[in-house]
Amino acid sequence: MSAQRSRRIRALVVDDEPLARSNLLVLLRADPDIESVAECGSGNEAVQAIRGTRPDLVFLDVQMPECGGFDVLHLLEGEVQPVIVFVTAYDDYALRAFDAGALDYLLKPFDDSRFQLAMARAKQKIAPAELHPPDAQRLAIRSAGQVSYVQIADIDWVEAADYYVCVHVGAKSHLLRRSMLELERELDPRLFCRIHRSTIVNLRTVARLELDAGEYEVILKSGQRLRLSRRFRKDLQSRMAAV
């Protein structure tokens, strides 16, 4: 990968078999384009890890007890998802894997050359997003015959508004004809966190969390109060500790 890219690939290996995880970990750690490799032994752990660490690439086992690979993707539906390479000992899941949006499908046992092919495809998929550091990106806001620009790092929070998203920057707000999912792909995952299905916040703008009538609210430094979904609470708390 080019030296001008902002960071290398963060990978996650998900498999309930320790030996299968170990084999992939060895191959990934030998790749100079891999920045870090984490591992999970279950689908439920994988969902939390993907939400919390936002890996670029996930090698995901299809068949796991309680929560298999397809269950993981179902639970993450509507959220930003990493590049997925399914790994399985059964070839009859291939069509379903590609229908689910997987980039590739590794059939166990696979050799090094087949693994390298999957990695080449993954790097090609990830590369466009890596060429431009998220901190340097700007959003183009078109309205009333003019185009203005907003630095992504200056965004305080984002909310869904029907077929638009409303981007809040200080006292100003801007409507964009984009989906939350599309915009979230452009936001730096180290800086932005989804706190509700319709709300994303800049972690640097969060002042505190408050419990109100059994429900948590996110209080921004501006005084803005935002609802925090239970689904995203642990992710937000763990990421706030790292900011």
Image (cartoon, rainbow, N blue to C red):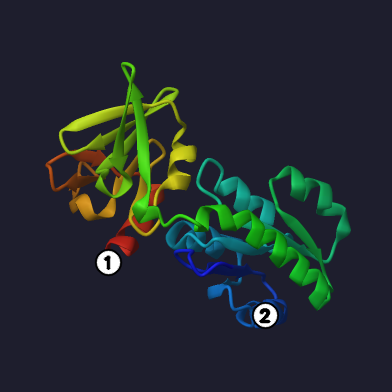
Identify the residue at image location x=79%, y=77%: 112
Residues 116 and 205: in front is 116
Q: Is residue 86 above or below residue 138?
A: below
Q: Quick one: label 2, few (<14), some, or many (20+) residues within 10 Å? A: few
* Image location (x, y in percent) of residue 190: 37, 59
Q: Is residue 201 above or below residue 112?
A: above
In the displayed structure, does residue 238 sit left or right of residue 112?
Answer: left
Q: Kindly tell me whether residue 82 is visible in this rendering.
A: no
Distance of mark 1 from mark 2, alpha carbons? 30 Å
Q: Nearer the viewer, mark 1 or mark 2?
A: 1
Amino acid at the residue labelled 2:
Pro
In the displayed structure, does residue 225 sit left or right of residue 101?
Answer: left
Q: Which residue is mark 1?
A: 241
Q: Which residue is mark 2?
A: 18
Secondary structure under the numbered disc 2 in the rendered image: helix
Residues 1 and 178: in front is 1
